[in-house]
Image (tube, helix red, strand yellow):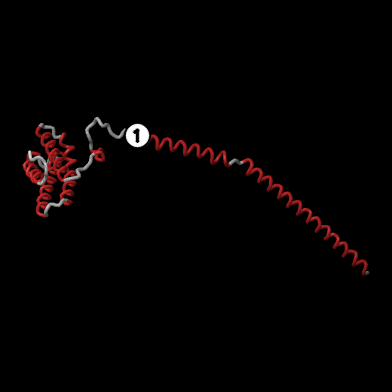
Amino acid sequence: MRRFIEFPLLAVLLVLLIATIGCEDSGSSTVGQADASHQDEGDHDHGDHDHGDHDHGDHSGHDHGDHSGHDHGDHSGHDHGASSDPSLPPTGSDHEEHNDPETYDEAVTELLATKKAIAEAFAAGKPDDAHGPLHDVGHLLGNTETLVEKSDMDDDTKKKLREAIEQLFASYGAVDDKMHNAEKGKDYSDVSEQIENAISTLKAQANISKE
């Protein structure tokens, strides 16, 4: 009876042993196949897919080369190379080429020339010729006031000159307003006397010809 019990037990153990060995072989084969498959995939991804030729080489050649040639070369040639014609009179865009007066005497000399240009334009019935000088005179008056403040003139003289400059601002401003809107401002003839008096005040303190 005992032998009949031991025999089936040994048979079961033998079957389990065989099954265990079979699983290990199968697992090893599977792992080996997986490694081989992974290697194949690695060879495919890195060998066949060319990063250097497709992504970086073509991109840099197309993007940076063409872009720099178009943007900077053409732009600089257009904007800076042909910015102005020296044969033409200066315009509002040419301020950077005009040097501001560095002394009070120089400023007054320019104010006299500007006053003459404006007066002659209106006298000749060509108010459009006065439009440019009218716009420029504001900058010139501001520069003149700065030079007055920096000078060694006494306070009373500086005050008198500031008042003359304010008069010129107001008078020339009124004429410019009239040119833009007929219902506002004043004609040049209405303020010419105030302009002449203010210019004479500035000229009296300048070391220039009094003619």
Residue 89: image quadrant is top left
Quadrant of the image for the N terminus?
Answer: bottom right
Horizontal side of 4 relative to 149 (left or right) equals: right
The mark tally for this picture is: 1
Residue 56 at x, y = what percent?
54, 41
Identify the residue at image location x=18%, y=43%: 140
Q: In this view, does 86 lie above or below 21?
A: above
Regarding residue 108, the answer to whether it shows in the image is: yes
Horizontal side of 82 relative to 159 (left or right) equals: right
Closer to the camera in the image, 38 or 198: 198
Residue holding disc 1: 78
Closer to the camera in the image, 19 or 123: 123
Regarding residue 187, the answer to whether it shows in the image is: no
Q: Is residue 131 above or below residue 152?
A: above
Residue 181: image quadrant is top left
Closer to the camera in the image, 12 or 119: 119
Horizontal side of 51 relative to 111 (left or right) equals: right
Quadrant of the image for the C terminus?
Answer: top left
Horizontal side of 15 relative to 45 (left or right) equals: right
Residue sitting farthest toward the bottom: 2
Callout 1: helix, strand or loop? Answer: helix
Kind of residue at disc 1: His
Residue 196 at x, y = what percent?
7, 42
Residue 105 at x, y = what percent?
14, 44
Closer to the camera in the image, 57 or 113: 113
Identify the residue at image location x=76%, y=51%: 29
Identify the residue at image location x=56%, y=39%: 54
Identify the residue at image location x=18%, y=37%: 132
Residue 92 at x, y = what percent?
23, 38
> Label 1 neighbourhood size at 10 Å, few (<14), some (14-19), many (20+)?
few
